[in-house]
Image: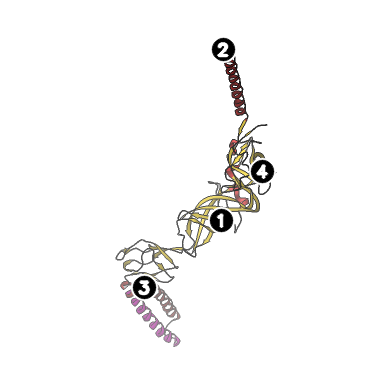
Amino acid sequence: MPQPTKHFIIASTLALLLLSGCSGNKDEKNNEEQVFAVPVTINPLERGQISSNYHSTAVLESINDAEVITRVTGIIEQLVVEEGDYVEKGQLIAEIDSRRYQLRLAQADAELASVTQELKRITAMHQKRLVSTERVDKLTYQQQSTKVTRDLAALDLKDSRITAPIAGFIASKLVKQGHFTQGYQKLVHIVDQKSLQAVLHIPEHQLANVALHQIAHLNFNAFPAQSFIAKIRSISPIINPQSGTFKVIMSLDNIGQQLKPGMFAQVALVFSTHSNALKVSSDAIISRDGQQYIYVVENNKAREIPITLGFIEKQLTEISGDIDQGAEIIVSGQHNVKSDTLVKVLNRSTESISATSTTTASR
């Protein structure tokens, strides 16, 4: 091979090696300079109503209910109601065998008539001074006693027919037709579902926050999409020394009769409400060294803002600080950023960071 050609090949090979080395160093340098944007999601800061609530549980009770009893003894001849039936006040529920009470009343009527007739005869004789005043007085007292006996017999006969003392539904039936009942035995339980109440036992330290007519929101597993309103009707004037709580009774209307006594309620008693508060998702708040922070997106970068907390309601928290309505609050990914971190907003409706949403070279 001629000498010039050999020198040319060697020179070309060296040049290619040098160029390759320079290119590799440049690529490595560019890779080192690349900065990745942290993906986040945002929600705009909004104003609205938020309340301070006390959360507890309660069991619904009927305000008006009655245990229906029998005052007389005997065999139940009729029991005309079943569980779930609606009864009006005064409606017949059951009848006790009344034959004995009818005979006692007839006997008492006869005795009263006899004593009354004798009193008339003695009174006429007394006017003629044929009998003493003492004899007349004795018969007068006997007539009064006989009349009381007659009235009691009439009352027993009336009580053999058991009627509803209130209007409502038969919640439970404790006897059956043909059973023998003793005096003052329970027959049925009636509940009025139109007006219900819920009883709360609230800790003593909340006493200053509770007032009459405050409202509460009641939720039930049976109606997950509905919330029912109750109002405080009464507040106990004493603190239970064993539990350190006081009793609060809330009433609620049940006009549609959807709710039933015995249902388990999740209660949110509203202490106070702010109507124009700045609200954020509670998950967006970061606590560090006793201070709370949120991150907002400004110019495609995260900015840390110290805040002060207010009311907390469900998953929302009232905040105040150097922040205005409409600010873009980072609600997901906030634990992966700090101030001036480049971010990529994943849920912004109009993309305004297309040039920097993937990677960018630091300058």
Which residue is label 3 attached to?
157
Give, as a single range, the part of the protein colored magenta.
Answer: 103-132
Quick one: SS at disc 1? Answer: strand
Which badge, 4 or 3, is on the more N-terminal residue?
3
Q: Are marks 4 and 3 in contact (CB under 8 Å)?
A: no
Extreme residue in the bottom direction: 128
The amino acid marked with disc number 2 is: Pro
Quick one: SS at disc 2? Answer: loop
Q: Which mark is residue 216?
A: 1
Q: Which mark is residue 305?
A: none
Marks 1 and 2, how far apart at CA: 104 Å
Q: Which of the 4 image quarters holds residue 275?
A: bottom right
**Residue 63 vs residue 271: left or right?**
left
Which badge, 1 or 2, is on the more N-terminal residue?
2
109 or 227, which is in the foreground? Answer: 227
Which badge, 1 or 4, is on the more N-terminal residue?
1
Marks 2 and 4, how far apart at CA: 86 Å
Q: Which mark is residue 2?
A: 2
Marks 4 and 3, how far apart at CA: 75 Å
